[in-house]
Image: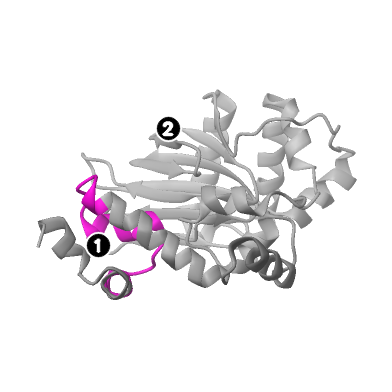
């Protein structure tokens, strides 16, 4: 059976994979309430790795860079996960309807929040899965109600989540040099880097060239290649594992760029040729 996503709607996704997968955009644009039904999920947000095992509920904050590795269960060979995307429009409508707002006291720096298991979470997930596993048995209107139910459950079990859910401010301008040094290995568009550093794309490019004396694309490729060289030569990692880790999209492009930069293919460096 091929890997597939059973449902891919604007706000709710039920995914099923049957082999290890590192695919997916490395940016979380909106808050996500997630449940791992089977298998496990390894998430790297650039600061630390988070392992989500079967039965885990978690909350991912918006505007977060992250790499995902989806690992099927060793027994049944499946990775299944439920994700409810809490987009800005939905949260603003919820805020206006029910009178919720952010207090301005939110100080948490964590982008990945593991939620303590609670019966209400499991009850919600089971009720939603009952619909999703039978696509013809539900309507879009029903799923919208389930999204609002997820928001209410989060607020009632963790009231402090209101300061995250209803904070609609965009990222402010931050230190570009420090940010890029921490996050160059995430494979996202320049527009994402610009947004996360509180800049328009044109301002980002202009500030970048003032700081680094080169274009963002050239700097990113050189930085990623240097990191790959270190990981292969000093850490003995395989090129097939390294190229994704440092931010390249495919192995062939990585190998071509690596050989052009260092005069030998990454496989040759690993073998000591």
| Residue segment shown in magenta | 232-255
- State the mark number for residue 1: 1
Q: Residue 265, image x and y in percent?
A: 20, 69
- Of residue 98 and residue 181, the one placed in the foreground of this image is 181
Give left or right: position of 166 versus 87.
right
- Of residue 19 and residue 76, the one placed in the foreground of this image is 19
Give left or right: position of 5 versus 72.
right
- Residue 112, magenta (yes or no): no
Q: Residue 181, image x and y in percent?
A: 53, 50
Residue 142 seen from this side: no
Image quadrant for the N terminus? bottom left
Structural crowding at the residue carrying mark 2, measured as other residues with C-alpha within 10 Å and reported as few (<14), some (14–19) or many (≥20): some
Rendered residue at 61%/53% (across/down): 177
Rendered residue at 75%/26% (across/down): 159
Decide: is 68 above or below 117: below
Going from N to C along the chain, the mark reached first, 2 or 1, is 1
- Secondary structure of the residue carrying tag 2 is loop
Colouring of the image: one colour
Image quadrant for the C terminus? bottom left
Magenta stretch: dominant secondary structure: helix
Residue 238 seen from this side: yes
Q: Residue 207, image x and y in percent?
A: 70, 64
Disc 2 target residue: 55
Rendered residue at 73%/38% (across/down): 164
- Secondary structure of the residue carrying tag 1 is loop
Structural crowding at the residue carrying mark 1, measured as other residues with C-alpha within 10 Å and reported as few (<14), some (14–19) or many (≥20): few
């Amino acid at each position: 059976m091929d890997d597939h996503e059973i449902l891919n709607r604007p706000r709710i996704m039920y995914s099923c994979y049957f082999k290890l997968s590192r695919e997916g955009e490395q940016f979380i644009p909106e808050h996500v309430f997630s449940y791992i039904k089977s298998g496990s999920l390894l998430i790297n947000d650039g600061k630390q790795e988070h392992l989500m095992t079967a039965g885990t509920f978690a909350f991912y904050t918006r505007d977060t860079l992250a790499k995902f590795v989806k690992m099927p269960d060793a027994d049944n060979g499946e990775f299944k996960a439920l994700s409810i995307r809490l987009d800005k429009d939905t949260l603003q409508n919820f805020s206006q309807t029910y009178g919720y707002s952010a207090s301005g006291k939110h100080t948490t720096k964590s982008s990945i929040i593991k939620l303590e298991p609670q019966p209400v979470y499991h009850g919600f997930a089971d009720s939603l899965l009952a619909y999703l596993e039978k696509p013809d048995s539900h309507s879009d209107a029903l799923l919208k109600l389930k999204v609002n139910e997820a928001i209410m459950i989060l607020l009632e079990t963790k009231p402090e989540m209101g300061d995250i859910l209803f904070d609609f401010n965009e990222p402010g301008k931050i230190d570009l040099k420090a940010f890029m040094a921490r996050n160059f290995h995430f494979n996202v568009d320049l527009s994402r880097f610009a947004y996360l550093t509180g800049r328009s794309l044109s301002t980002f490019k202009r500030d970048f060239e003032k700081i680094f004396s080169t274009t963002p694309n050239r700097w990113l490729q050189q930085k990623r290649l240097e990191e790959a060289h270190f990981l292969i030569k000093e850490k003995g990692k395989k090129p097939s594992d390294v190229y994704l880790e440092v931010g390249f999209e495919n192995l062939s492009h990585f190998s071509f760029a690596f050989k052009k930069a260092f005069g030998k293919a990454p496989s040759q460096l690993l073998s000591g040729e």
